[in-house]
Amino acid sequence: MNTENQNQQSTEFPQAQIQPANSTSMSVLKATKLWWLTLICVLISLGLVYWSSRPQGMEIQIHFDEGHGLKIGDALKFKGIDVGTVKDIQLSKDSKQVDVTAVLFEESKNLAHQGCDFWIVRPQVSLSKVSGLETVVGARYVQVRPSQNPGPAAHFFNGMTAPPTIANISPFKIHINFDEGHGLKKGDLLLYRGIEIGEVTEVVLQEDLSGVQVTIHLVKSAQSIARTGTLFWIERPSVSLSGVRGLDTIVGGRYVTLLPGPDNTFTQLVFKGLSEAPPILERSEGGLEIILEAQERNGLQPSSPVTYRGISVGYITSVGLASDAGLVEARAYIKPTFRHLVRVDSMFWAISGVEVELGFTGVKMNMESLQTITAGGVAFRTPKSNSANATTGRRFDLATEVEPSWLEWEPQLAVGTHLLPGGLTLPSPARASLNWSERNYVGLLRDRQRDGWILPLSNSKLISLSDMLSPVEGAHEGKTTLAVEGQELTITEDNSVSKSGVSIFTLHSSQSIFTNLWPSARLRSPKEPEDCILWISASEPALPIAQGRMEKQTPEAEGSTPHWQFKQELSFEDSWNGASVISRNDGKLIGFLHLSDGNPKIIPLPEKLFSKS
């Protein structure tokens, strides 16, 4: 029974057979795994060897005043590309600076030369600029700016506190010593005529604590301003009786500005800055500088006016004691146009404050201007016109009161200009109006008038544009009159000769009412445009016009007037119609400015006019 059951069981459930394992296959598998592991280790070792032998770049050290949150691993960037990384940050030994050790990548190591600039880029928001906003959410980084004129390779640098404002700054620098800093800081600008020509790179106290030394790097094109006589000051808001200045610094921040010294002077690198802006920002070439000596200051100060017959012709530049302290010396500058008013026998007196006279008829007050109440002033008169002209450095006594006889002097002194050779004088044109009547389109009579300038000549003639000295065609009853110097002159074809836009009017002996006559010998007919000046009166500045700004126009139409056209559009006030055109070569009258048709042009004196006059 049991045997039978066993046979039946063996038939229903097959039994597994166990055989011993193959030792050779096991060995191959283990060897394969060991080979791959070895290969991986070898590759890793080779990679480590290669990485360790790869050049790591140049290590540099940068000294910053502040770390501004910079940390190890932050980048050095140039033009938005990583060129290195921060390796270490530590306080300096004296704890006054932060020493940043950085590594420049091998391909960027040529950036490390003398003159290279580094600064930490961080968010900066002020009234004058906004920068570094990308670091609000991102990490700080060090910005690199290579030098435009690289020096030798360097490993140590002084970092900048703020990013530079001017891109083309040069290594050329000057030092200016100021009594006060007035809020000036690194990164502020040096401006001249509104143009950025330098940047403040350092503001420190002087060693003796007597003032502030400002270091400024100049752009290459402005290095010539570093010369003897250049004046520097910090522009800031100021309000006085003489004017309001520096309002732009309320929003835009402080800046340094200047008044250049004379040409052809020596280079200078250290300057004494002014405590405030000089009274006049420009000194035209050809002015006169004189010295006034007095027993007392008489209220004078820089910017005090110098007047002639109540007209400002100059100003006081400085006031101080003489070298022996025996007198007060006031230096005065006379504008070029008026320098010929000062002769060797001119008399000067102080006009400081208000003069009050009390009498039976009441109280009499006398003052030149509101400015002289606070800033003082100087007036002068000249006795005769044939005395010698004063020269620069001439000394004059400054009286405390005016002698009544001085006010009676009335010499005829022509006003000149430095724009003419040898200080030649300028003409004295007279303001005039041409008057006539004409009927309009409905037959009603109406009065017409044309204003302009005419020039009295020494040969009893007047010269000007034809539309000022010629009879008007179509005038009622053929009557054209000229109102000038309080008289009315009748213009007819008999007394007026006109050629090519210019007329000459002949005066009768009873009509010779003019003074300061222009010599008839100082008239010339020019052949081509030339350097000249436009002039109407001493109350307006002379306007120089270069030859290259004009071109000769010879109209083809018969009867049209040859003229010089301005190449660039210029605008003039209507009051300049008939302005004299004076040659800068010889000081002669060569034409007139014509504005009547709305197209500014110069009408030259025609040669054929003189043969008929």
Image: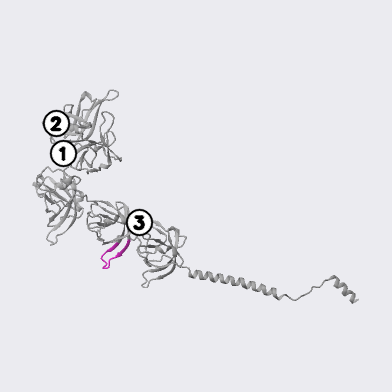
| Among the two numbered marks 1 and 2 on one chain, the one whose residue lies closer to the N terminus | 2
For residue 245: magenta?
no
Q: What residue is drawn where x is 40% and y is 61%?
A: 144
| Residues rendered magenta in the picture | 201-214
* Mark 1 neighbour density, 10 Å: few (under 14) some (14–19) many (20 or more): few
Percent of width and height locating residue 249: 32, 54
For badge 3, the amino acid type reads: Asn
Q: Relative to the observer, which residue lies in front, 147 or 275?
A: 147
Q: CA distance from mark 1 to mark 2?
A: 19 Å
The N terminus: image quadrant: bottom right
CA gap, disc 3 and disc 1: 51 Å
Q: Position of residue 469 (x, y in %)?
A: 20, 31
Please tell me the numbered disc located at residue 111: none
Dot 2: within a 10 Å radius of its alpha carbon, few (fewer than 14), some, or many (20 or more) residues? some
Please indicate whether residue 157 sits to the left or right of residue 8 in the image.
left
Asked if one can make out residue 366 in the rendered structure from this viewpoint, the answer is no
Residue 40 visible (yes or no): yes
Residue 210 among magenta residues = yes
Residue type, numbered disc 1: Arg
The answer to whether residue 509 is left or right of residue 569 is left
Mark seen at residue 507: 2
Residues under numbered marks 2 and 3 in contact, where contact means CB atoms less than 8 Å apart: no
Q: Which residue is mark 1?
A: 522
Whole-Å distance between the Cαs marked 2 and 3? 65 Å
